[in-house]
Amino acid sequence: MRTRKQLVTKGLLAALAAGLLMSCQGNKAGNSTTPAATPAAGTNTAAAGGFKMAYVDLDSLEAHFEYFKEKRAVLEQKQQQMDNQLQGKARALQSEYADLQRRANTLTQEQGETAQRSLMSKQQQLEQEAQNLRAAYTEQETKFNEELQKRLDAFLKSFNADKRYAFIFSYRSTASNILYKDPAYDVTADVIKGMNAQDSTPAK
């Protein structure tokens, strides 16, 4: 599942700086000897001032989100069927070409040229068919990814309805802008559990 890239932009840095600045100003306004409030156990607090962040491991989500696995399996089956169809027609075309070569000495020049034109026309048709099938598959894959992104966005909006987290990042082991992650801030298991439960709930 391809999700939107989470880039550390100037806006994000500014937001982080603002959160830390507010925390520092809050400490200055009170008694400077008073220790900062300690986060309660089990809370994923990124700063003492209450600036909270979390992340979702997309590799784990894709491995355990049942809806994703089912839809991905259907998409992969369609791709396999497409490949088998194109490979079968390509083999048939190759066989026809090999047969033409074997019969070349028995054909008149006109017959040979006609057969060659027929083969070239069939090859062009196959190439066009392959292009159309791949375009259709790419469109289906794009819709699949967009649907999954919408489902994840909608769930996270509900999941974070209490505004616990200022940011929820995505993480992927092979491509991520997050250089370090603390497991204490991992909400993946909760997201997987919630999304699977949501899909298993019968529609009213």
Image: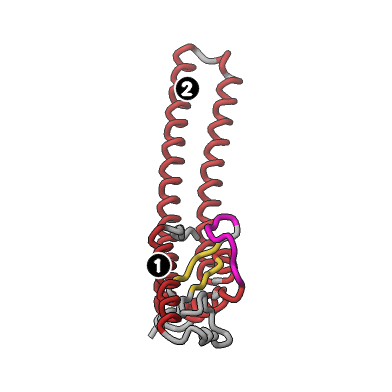
- The residue at the point 45 percent across, 81 percent down is 27
Is residue 178 within the magenta segment?
A: yes
Label 1 crowding class (10 Å Cα cut-off): few <14, some 14-19, many 20+?
Answer: some
- Kindly identify the amino acid type of the residue bearing the numbered disc 1: Ala
Secondary structure, mark 2, is: helix
Of 51 and 26, nearer the camera is 26
Residue 101: x and y in percent read 58, 20
Task: Name the amino acid type tagged 2.
Answer: Ala
Q: Nearer the viewer, residue 47 or 35?
A: 35
Residue 19 visible (yes or no): yes
Residue 29 percent coordinates (x, y):
40, 83
State how far apart marks 1 and 2 are (Cα): 70 Å
Q: Give me the disc on residue 15.
A: 1
175 lies above or below 152: above
Q: Is residue 196 in view? A: no
Nearer-N-terminus badge (1/2)? 1
Classify mark 2: residues with Cα within 10 Å, few (<14), some (14-19) or many (20+): some
Q: Which residues are magenta?
A: 174-182
What residue is pinned by disc 2? 115
Which label was assigned to residue 168? Answer: none
